[in-house]
Amino acid sequence: MVGMASDEEIYRKYADELTRFATGLVGPDNATDAVSAAMIGVFTSAKWPSALNQRAYLYRAVLNECRMQGRRTATRRRYEQRTPAAGDADPDGAGPADAPKPEVLAAVLALSDRQRAVVYLTYWEDLEPSRIAELLGISDGAVRRHLARARRHLRKTLR
Amino acid sequence: MTDLDTRIRAAIVEIVESAPEAPRYEDLVHEVEPARSHPRGQRRSSRTRLALIGAAAILALVVGAWVLTARRNGGSTARTERPAGSSPSVPAAVSGHEQRIVEVLLPPRLDINTSVPRGSAWSVNVLPGATERAYSVDGGTVFAVTDQEQRGSDPSKPMSESCAVFPETAGVRGHCEPLSSVEKGQVHAVFLAQDFPRHALDTTVWAHLPGGTAFVTFATPSVHLWQRPIHGTAAFAVNVPAQYQGRDFGAAPKPVLRAFSANGKLIATVEAPADN
């Protein structure tokens, strides 16, 4: 008899791809926190044991957590703009060596959460709209709309 | 593949290649119950199950008693058909139908002490002196409201914020505004929750209502509701009009909320967010 996979086995199977997904949504600095929070939410959820499509469930959990963190980040940004702390500025204007270029990150982070999710799954995972729709729990049409709007936005910003 | 596709792919690759290592499972497990590594479906101990059943039974009794009381008083469970203004206790300026808000037991899923991971780079705690409270509106939607302190990657810069927390498809979602701005009246703590991805029900919450607020109204071109807030919080759960369901968020007209004093004096007007 084949036993059901434990949470640990499931997590180990999907952890890397979920972290990449979160990076595409909230950037490398917040991805680990987003995945951690999402997974804890999943593993303590009463619905998780009965989830039929575990991968889709995990993707939606990470997307939801990233949306929540995005809101917090936006709030924090507004807050910090009002209360600048001395020594905040990076004198070199350079981040970590492996960080994406600020203009590239800014262009992608300027998309809505759902647009970013669709762009990531299209261009990194090479998924068809129907598969993306299944993962995110939205319609094919919504996926195509989000992708079209994201492309229109990125056309202007990624020059 | 077009040139635009190439540029987008390059941007995504650039971002994703900066992905950090996935969090270690061992770092997650101490945050959740010890039975975490048991096979799925066998996770909850019988003691936990009994506790959950007990809590559910108590909640059912409380809700049942409340429903009976409401019916005895001539109301319905969620929304009375008695228009405002017809009762001497409701000023004429408060129009529409009543939608009630009640305080309920704080579900663990929304409890900041159990639903927020501990030990990660950021932490969130209820502010000293504040209380996280859960509410049910229209006999259904349950959400929590709290004032919290968030410490992010730089713990020396904590941020105090007023938040509403809602359950979502998987996990929960919080909406926050800086508490100092709310207290100074620079922004209103008005939050919108949409049942992503279905988007058939919008819940609008107004926390930190101005002092002296006794009634809050909610108005769209087709819906007019009013409510007696509790603990300085009002909330309205409204079905999204069919033509906007499943469409992009923010397409429907923005509701307008108004706070009134007990004698019907308008205290504040705020436009609800169209998107969250």
Image (cartoon, coloured by chain):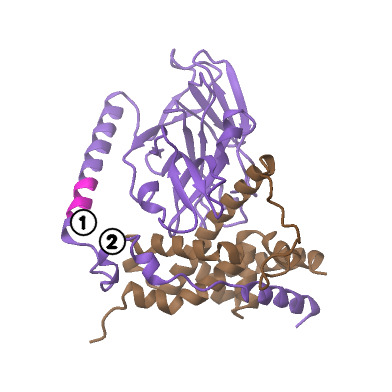
Chain colours: A brown, B purple
In the rendered structure, the residue with mark 2 lies on which chain?
B
Q: Label for residue B205?
A: none
Is residue A61 located in the magenta-colored stretch of the structure? no
Q: Residue sitting at 65 percent across and 45 percent down?
A: A80
Q: Using the image as rendered, state which of residue A5 and residue B213 is in the foreground.
A: A5
Q: Using the image as rendered, state which of residue A153 and residue A41 is in the foreground.
A: A41
**Quadrant containing the N terminus of chain B in the rendered view:** bottom right
The residue under label 1 is B48
Q: Using the image as rendered, state which of residue B24 and residue B242 is in the foreground.
A: B24
Q: Is residue A118 above or below residue B275?
A: below
Residue B216 screen position, x and y as percent: 52, 27
Q: Residues within 10 Å of mark 2 (few under 14, many from 20)?
A: few
Q: Earlier in the sequence, mark 1 or mark 2?
A: 2
Residue B130 screen position, x and y as percent: 42, 34
Q: Is residue B139 above or below residue B109?
A: above
Marks 1 & 2, CB-CB < 8 Å contact: yes
The span picked out in magenta is B49-56
Q: Residue sitting at 21 percent across and 56 percent down?
A: B48
Q: Residue sitting at 29 percent across and 67 percent down?
A: B36
Question: Mark 1 against mark 2, which lies toward the viewer?
Answer: 2
How far, Cα to Cα, is label 1 from label 2?
10 Å
Main secondary structure of the magenta stretch: helix
Q: Residue furthest right?
A: A159
Amino acid at dot 1: Thr
The residue under label 2 is B33
Helix, strand or loop status at disc 1: helix
Q: Is residue A118 visible?
A: yes
Residue B218 screen position, x and y as percent: 55, 32
Q: Is residue B53 above or below residue A12?
A: above
Q: In terms of image quadrants, where is residue A149?
A: bottom right
Residue A92 screen position, x and y as percent: 76, 61
Q: Using the image as rendered, state which of residue B258 and residue B164 is in the foreground.
A: B164
